[in-house]
């Protein structure tokens, strides 16, 4: 098993810098998700890993092999595209067989009629059929092998595309938004199938998505990209709970993290609505900062309790959770809290409440978006 490393990759098209010094190293057998908004350079990076594009600077490694100058066909990497890229005139079985036929049959052996007369062709074809059937069975599409792409659903086509990648037993998989053409319920179902497939095959995988939930739920590690830069590369838990940059905090999590503007005071604290919200901030007094806390970190109390004053604007019941949209007193900004439905039953639009944030859940970002240190022991809830 080999790891896949992209080291110091930069790429520009006509003076536009698409990738800026991006380094991502997937360990052998690891599932790495590349996530970021549309246009941040994810596909370009994947195409560079596949050899379909070339970096201006940087290198691509599979294990100990430098593949930067190698053609795509020599890289032992399989790519699954968003569009599936199936041959429309071939059946599912023939589509899956293509990479094996290219690898194991000569040009002459692949010719119709004449090929079947050449020595060894029948045996190789039979072996290819066996591999195709085994792969199709593992993906539960063995009953579809005689159908053409137009006769299959999106989910079925997507599995055929996966089958065509799997059958090669490549050293690494590259997947570019393979689920984006599927409807919501099939996406959720298929993402667990891909994870299961990855667990069984154990092949190093780079998986591109713009869907943060997909990245968090599927990957061992997540690389968050924006504007051609890698902002953070870490476990899903760290990306969510310990974002290194305000853009990571904003992009990851639904609903979005709550963000409030503030300023570090002379005692290294930050006040919101006149109340001390966090202290021990590692920044010079007067620094303008942004405070962040996740919707589930908010605890709501009655209007007589200590905390930031707010009023309930709207309540959205979502089944397993309830979102409560709040307006801070004095026009201090809008927030959203995520509560258990039972906690929210006592709330009504227009009601006055107080907001407290669990100690240790407050993140502070500097004006350049980077995280500022906060002395852990000094952190305070909003009712301080
Ligand atoms: N061959 C090209 N020539 C010029 N610009 C390109 C080329 N390929 C990509 N770009 C530009 O590079 C930027 C990054 O594109 P890329 O497809 O890598 O983004 P992405 O993050 O995968 O986006 P999406 O999620 O929408 O697919 C875009 O602004 C795109 O227009």
Image (cartoon, grey):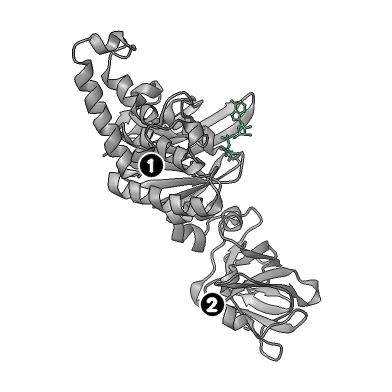
Q: Earlier in the sequence, mark 2 or mark 1?
A: 1
Quadrant location of the N terminus?
top left
Residue lying at the far right of the rendered structure: 330
The quadrant in which residue 90 appears is top left
The image position of residue 210, as x and y in percent, is 56, 46
The image position of residue 74, as x and y in percent, is 34, 22
Alpha carbon distance from label 2 to label 1: 37 Å
Quick one: 307 or 342, which is closer to the camera?
Answer: 342
Quick one: 240 or 351, which is closer to the camera?
Answer: 351
Question: Circle 1 sits in a helix, a strand or a loop, which is it?
Answer: strand
* Residue 9 visible to the viewer: no
* Residue 83 visible to the viewer: yes
Tell me, yes or no, whether the two marked residues, 2 and 1, touch with CB atoms within 8 Å.
no
The numbered dot on residue 205 is 1
The image position of residue 103, as x and y in percent, is 29, 21
- Mark 2 lies on residue: 359
């Amino acid at each position: 098993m080999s790891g896949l490393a992209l080291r110091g990759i930069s790429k520009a098209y006509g003076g536009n810098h698409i990738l800026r010094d991006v380094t991502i190293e997937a360990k052998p057998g690891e599932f790495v998700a590349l996530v970021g908004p549309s246009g941040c350079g994810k596909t370009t990076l994947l195409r560079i890993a596949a050899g379909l594009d070339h970096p201006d600077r940087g290198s691509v490694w599979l294990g100990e092999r430098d593949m930067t100058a190698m053609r795509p066909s020599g890289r032992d990497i399989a790519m699954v595209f968003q569009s599936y890229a199936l041959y429309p005139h071939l059946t599912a079985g023939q589509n899956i067989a293509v990479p094996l036929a290219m690898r194991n049959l000569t040009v002459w052996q692949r010719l119709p009629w004449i090929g079947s007369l050449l020595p060894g062709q029948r045996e190789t074809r039979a072996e290819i059929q066996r591999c195709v059937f085994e792969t199709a069975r593992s993906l539960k599409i063995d009953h579809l092998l005689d159908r053409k792409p137009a006769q299959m659903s999106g989910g079925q086509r997507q599995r055929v595309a996966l089958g065509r990648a799997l059958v090669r037993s490549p050293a690494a998989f590259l997947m570019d938004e393979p689920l984006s053409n599927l409807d919501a319920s099939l996406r959720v179902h298929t993402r667990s199938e891909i994870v299961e497939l990855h667990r069984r095959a154990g092949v190093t995988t780079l998986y591109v998505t713009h869907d943060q939930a997909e990245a968090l739920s599927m990957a061992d590690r997540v690389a968050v990209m924006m504007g051609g830069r890698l902002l953070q590369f870490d476990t899903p838990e760290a990306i969510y709970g310990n974002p290194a940059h305000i853009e990571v905090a904003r992009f990851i999590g639904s609903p979005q993290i709550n963000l409030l503007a503030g300023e570090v005071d002379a005692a290294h604290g930050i006040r919101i609505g006149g109340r001390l919200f966090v202290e021990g901030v590692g920044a010079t007094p007067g620094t303008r900062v942004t405070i962040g806390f996740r919707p589930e970190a908010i605890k709501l109390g009655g209007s007589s309790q200590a905390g930031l004053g707010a009023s309930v604007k709207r309540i959205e019941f979502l089944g397993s959770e309830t979102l409560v949209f709040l307006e801070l007193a004095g026009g201090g900004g809008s927030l959203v809290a995520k509560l258990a439905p039972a906690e929210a039953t006592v709330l009504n639009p227009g009601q006055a409440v107080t907001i407290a944030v669990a100690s240790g859940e407050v993140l502070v970002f500097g004006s350049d978006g980077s995280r500022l240190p906060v002395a852990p022991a000094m952190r305070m809830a909003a009712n301080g």
